[in-house]
Amino acid sequence: MGNDLKTLEELVELRKEGGDNAIAGRERFMIAEEFPILVDECGNSPHWIKRHAKRGRRYKQFICALGQNDTAENFGLQGDKDTLYSCFCLVRLGQFGRDYARTKLKDPQLEQWLKAGGKKRFMVDDCPCELDLSNWGTGATVQVENSTGGDEVQSQPTTMNEFEQFILDWGQQHPGQVLKAAHFSRATRLFDNMQPDEIRIFFVSMADRGVGEVVDSGDRLGWRWSK
């Protein structure tokens, strides 16, 4: 973090002398994992986050600070909430997003919407967001010339990881049957290190790409093969 602050000061001087061209190619995106621990263990962390939040963007030095809650103290900004809320977008994932919808926004319907969408739904500040997974894991679309001289669009085959391939194979062997996350503990060790909601995100992403369909929602969400 000390070196990062020195680099930022160097960029300030370079830009002052030579303009934006002088700092071209020096862009960086830095991720600070478990920021509350860094606050406890690194004396540079409060200055690092404040300096980059207020000046870093101008010099293409962007940061992402990760923590378990959104208090200013957690990010070394005691008494300076304005910096946290004016210089950052606050992304709330999983249970943190659902808790925020219920307790801060007082919106139980939003809480249920977030829960039903699994990991593809979350909060950015006070705004609900959903990832578009429709093209996730699919090949590129290419243009080729057909025999009549016109253009014809062809899609590359959809690529799948080993988890999705297992789900697809199971579905094709059991057409019409609904696959639930709990099934995996009995069927295979492939998913041993995954939580049920992590498995459900595979169900949703496959259905979004037209591979099978999801059934029900939330903790009851399942997937089945359909042509």
Image (cartoon, rainbow, N blue to C red):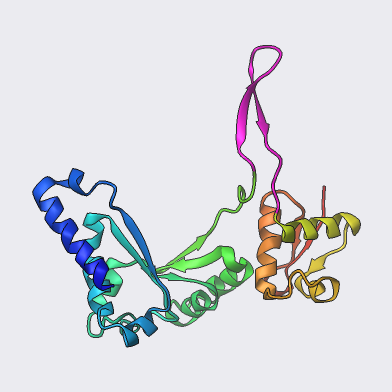
In this rendered view, identify the residue nearer to me: 213 or 27.
27
* Boundaries of the magenta span: 139-160
Image coordinates of residue 60 in percent, x first then y, are 27, 55
Q: How many marks?
A: 0
Residue at image position (54%, 57%) is 131
Image coordinates of residue 40 in percent, x first then y, are 33, 87
Image coordinates of residue 142 in percent, x first then y, are 61, 31
Q: Quick check: 224 left or right of 218?
A: right
Relative to residue 87, is residue 136 depicted above or below? Answer: above
**Quadrant in the picture for residue 181:** bottom right
Relative to residue 142, is residue 18 depicted above or below? Answer: below
Residue at image position (87%, 62%) is 177
Relative to residue 115, is residue 213 depicted above or below? Answer: above
Residue furthest to the front in view is 3
Q: Quick check: 85 left or right of 113?
A: left
Residue furthest to the left in view is 17
Where's the N terminus, which quadrant?
bottom left
Residue at image position (80%, 76%) is 185
Q: Quick check: 110 left or right of 179?
A: left
**Quadrant in the picture for residue 167:** bottom right
In this rendered view, identify the residue nearer to me: 98 or 66.
66
Residue furthest to the top in view is 148
Based on the picture, tell me whether residue 32 belongs to the magenta stretch: no
Based on the picture, tell me whether residue 154 belongs to the magenta stretch: yes
Relative to residue 174, is residue 143 depicted above or below? Answer: above
**Quadrant in the picture for residue 47:** bottom left
Residue at image position (25%, 69%) is 3
In this rendered view, identify the residue nearer to me: 122 or 18.
18
Image coordinates of residue 42 in percent, x first then y, are 30, 82
